[in-house]
Image (spheres, helix red, strand yellow):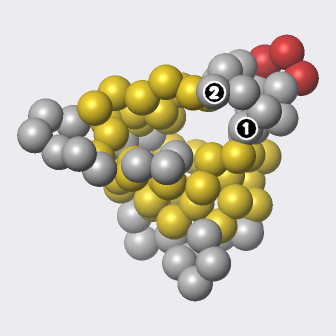
Amino acid sequence: MRPEIKLESRGGIDNRLVQVEGESLKFELKTEYNYRVGLKDNEEDGYTFIDPAGGPFIAVGSEIEGHVVKAIHKGGIVEFES
């Protein structure tokens, strides 16, 4: 995977995923605006989705550039399957 993934966002909003240092499958969402999340039941650190302003909506199991999202963590961290 590339160290930075530019996401397809509406309205010229710059949303991207930037690789977490030392973690080849974890990326942090970088966005100009806030985002909303769906909380997992009985889990403080896990989200079911993350939705930045302008998109795209990212859910566990969705695919970005041919890679499947395994988990979404607090702090806007998106983890991909190996």
Outermost residue on the top side: it is: 11
Q: Do residues under tags 1 and 2 come within 8 Å of each other at their CB atoms?
A: yes
Residue 45 in view here: yes
Q: CA distance from mark 1 to mark 2?
A: 7 Å
Kind of residue at disc 1: Thr
Residue placed under numbered mark 2 in the picture: 34
From the top left corner, tell me how far across and down residue 55 is, in percent: 65, 24
Identify whether 51 is placed above or below 42.
above
Amino acid at dot 2: Asn
Q: Local crowd at mark 1 within 10 Å, few (<14), some, or many (≥20)?
A: some
| Label 1 element class | loop
* Image location (x, y in percent) of residue 27: 58, 60
From the image, which quarter does the N terminus lie in?
bottom right
Which residue occupies the extreme bottom position in the image? 22
Say which mark, if any, is on residue 21: none
Q: Nearer the viewer, residue 9 or 21?
A: 21
**On the image, numbered disc 1 is attached to which residue?**
31
Question: Is residue 65 visible from the viewing direction of this image?
Answer: no
Instruction: Specify few, some or many for label 2: CA neighbours under 10 Å numbering under 14, 14-19, or 20 or more.
Output: few
